């Protein structure tokens, strides 16, 4: 009998996730599908930072959330022919049996033609993280040629794309990442003007050196003290795109109700700070994918992945990503 595997969110996260938070279960696969049903088999699964704070919304015992690139194994639905690929929010499972007509657009769609790029890019630069960079930078920071853009989490799935799009737009780009190796990658491979290791370099001194005239746009992936220091170095009418706060995700004592003391910079520099969730641009989803694809084809946008082999290693891939072991997009190959 053929069976599938899935990871259950067994115990609520509290601090750093551990293997105790997950439970592996097996389930039986159907021999046939009924009218309107499709059986998908995961090929690549995504591990993303948002999974850490988002799971607080769910009770223990649910399937772990997440996106995957999956192949249609059996189909009784004309839109999903057998052998075709989709992007679906199916969670941490090897197989998924659903009636697609009962799901909305943002949950499942056929993988667009990626023009020969790896299909796993549908979870990265040609999917949610790529669109996060594209819309979050261009629609909120609105960088102008000659301006200085800073991005944190710079060597990751979102940050590496943000920095390169800012370069395409003619900006000076400064990245902060967690190792010298990542900083070298940003400058030598991706064309960032400066990259600093936030674990060892003095943030204020780094900014004085790389941005003596101040920072115009800040794409914030991490929150916390680094962000406060960067915001303190911003120019009049600077723009801050608040994308995430990974530095706080594993903290046990986060005070969510209190804003950090950013008011002096916000007031005197007359800054604009705006948070977003990328699904805000669901109606323009394929515009982002097509533009990033075009830049890749033109050699203007480079991308890398950190691939973990084997579905059973999903939890480890998740821990590794949260701990900075990935460069570019962290994914799992089944
Ligand atoms: N608003 C939205 O719609 C979306 C928001 N996001 C957010 O964007 C951010 C980046 O996501 P993504 O690109 O997928 O992930 P990444 O690929 O950047 O992976 C996470 C990275 O975070 C860094 N990190 C971990 N702990 C810390 C810390 N304490 N301080 C600073 N950096 C840390 C690590 O890199 P390092 O070695 O540099 O420490 C790690 O590699 C996250 O905050 C995420 O929640 C993502 C998608 C959509
Ligand atoms: C325990 C401390 C929590 C601190 C939380 C601080 C800020 C929230 C934050 O960083 C949120 C990030 C959100 C990322 C969103 C990603 C979306 O793309 C996910 C889409 C998933 C979906 O809607 O199905």
Image (cartoon, rainbow, N blue to C red):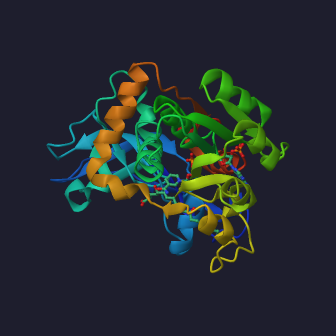
- In this rendered view, identify the residue nearer to me: 168 or 77: 168
Q: Is residue 206 above or below residue 50?
A: above
Q: Position of residue 268 (x, y in %)?
A: 63, 65
- Left or right position of 109 against 145: left
- Left or right position of 229 against 240: right
Residue appearing at x 55%, y 67% in the figure: 55
Q: Is residue 258 above or below residue 247?
A: below
Residue appearing at x 69%, y 63% in the figure: 248
Q: Quadrant of residue 20?
A: bottom right
Q: Is residue 212 above or below residue 294?
A: below
Residue appearing at x 58%, y 42% in the figure: 149
Q: Is residue 116 visible?
A: yes
Q: Position of residue 134 (x, y in %)?
A: 43, 42
Q: Quadrant of residue 198?
A: top right
Callout count: 0
Q: Is residue 24 visible?
A: no
Q: Position of residue 332 (x, y in %)?
A: 55, 39
- Left or right position of 288 against 206: left
Q: Is residue 27 above or below residue 251?
A: above
Q: Position of residue 70 (x, y in %)?
A: 38, 41
């Amino acid at each position: 009998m053929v069976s599938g595997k899935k990871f259950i969110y067994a115990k609520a996260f509290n601090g750093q996730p551990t293997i105790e938070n997950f439970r592996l279960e097996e389930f039986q696969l159907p021999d046939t599908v009924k009218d309107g049903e499709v059986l998908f088999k995961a090929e690549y699964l995504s591990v993303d930072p948002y999974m850490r704070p988002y799971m607080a919304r769910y009770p223990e015992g649910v399937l772990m959330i997440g996106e995957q690139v999956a192949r249609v194994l059996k189909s009784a639905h004309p839109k999903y022919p057998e052998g075709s690929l989709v992007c679906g929010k199916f969670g941490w499972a090897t197989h998924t049996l659903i009636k697609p007509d009962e799901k909305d657009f943002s949950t499942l769609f056929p993988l667009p033609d990626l023009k020969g790029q790896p299909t796993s890019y549908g979870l990265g630069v040609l999917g949610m993280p790529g669109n996060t960079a594209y819309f979050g930078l261009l629609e909120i920071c609105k960088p102008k040629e000659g301006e200085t853009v800073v991005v944190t989490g710079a060597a990751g799935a979102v940050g590496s794309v943000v920095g390169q799009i800012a370069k395409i737009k003619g900006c000076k780009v400064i990245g902060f990442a967690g190792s010298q190796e990542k900083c070298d990658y940003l400058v030598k491979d991706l064309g960032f003007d400066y990259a600093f290791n936030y674990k060892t370099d003095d943030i204020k001194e780094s900014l004085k050196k790389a941005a003596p005239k101040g920072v115009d746009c800040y794409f914030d992936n991490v929150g916390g003290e680094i962000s406060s220091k960067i915001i303190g170095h911003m120019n009049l009418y600077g723009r801050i795109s608040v994308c995430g706060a990974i530095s706080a995700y594993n903290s046990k004592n986060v005070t969510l109700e209190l804003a950090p003391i950013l008011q002096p910079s916000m007031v005197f520099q007359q800054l604009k700070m705006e948070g977003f969730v990328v699904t805000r641009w669901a109606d323009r989803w394929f515009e982002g994918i097509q533009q990033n694809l075009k830049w890749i084809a033109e050699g203007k946008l480079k991308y890398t992945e950190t691939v973990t082999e084997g579905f059973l290693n999903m939890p480890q891939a998740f821990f590794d990503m949260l701990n900075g072991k990935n460069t570019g997009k962290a994914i799992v190959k089944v």
